[in-house]
Image (cartoon, rainbow, N blue to C red):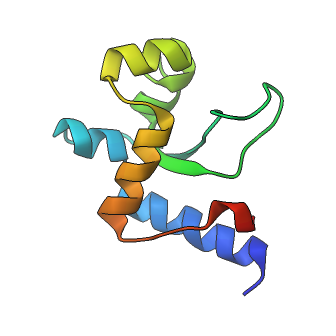
Amino acid sequence: MNKKKEMQRIYERQKEDGCILCKKLGQKQTTHTEIHHLRSGQGIAQRGIRCVPLCVKHHRTHEGFHGLGRKGFEKTYNISEDELLQEWESESGMSVNWSDF
């Protein structure tokens, strides 16, 4: 399978799985799932390939990653982007070699 198709398969799987933070917090997800590209270890303008599924609330509202910023998000939810990725990989049973992309 080519890299683009494999990445699309991962995105679709993440959308099906739902928000990893809602699951971790024991909350019912009330908005659709979006793909959040991890910024940790990336330059500010770069879009990393590593990603996690987040609902709209936890992705881009004032309560989400883009509303709070990385430090605010980590402080509010006591979890980092890398830890969310590890949580998703553990929950989904998928082990993605992100360096392949």
Task: Give above or below for 81 relative to 99.
Answer: above
Task: Give above or below for 47 relative to 96.
Answer: above
Task: Give above or below for 37 relative to 7.
Answer: above
Q: Residue furthest right?
A: 45
Relative side of 60 to 16, left or right: right
Residue at x 48%, y 21% (from the top left corner):
61
Residue at x 42%, y 21% (from the top left corner):
74
Query: Residue 8: x percent and y percent?
Result: 65, 69
Picture quadrant of residue 99: bottom right
How many numbered badges does the structure rendering display? 0
Query: Residue 60: x percent and y percent?
Result: 53, 26
Picture quadrant of residue 55: top left
Residue at x 41%, y 41% (from the top left corner):
83
Query: Residue 86: x percent and y percent?
Result: 41, 51
- Report if residue 67 is visible in the image: no
Residue at x 45%, y 23% (from the top left corner):
64
Task: Give above or below for 31 relative to 75.
Answer: below
- Report if residue 48 is visible in the image: yes
Query: Residue 16: x percent and y percent?
Result: 41, 64
The N terminus - image quarter: bottom right
The C terminus - image quarter: bottom right
Q: Residue furthest left?
A: 26
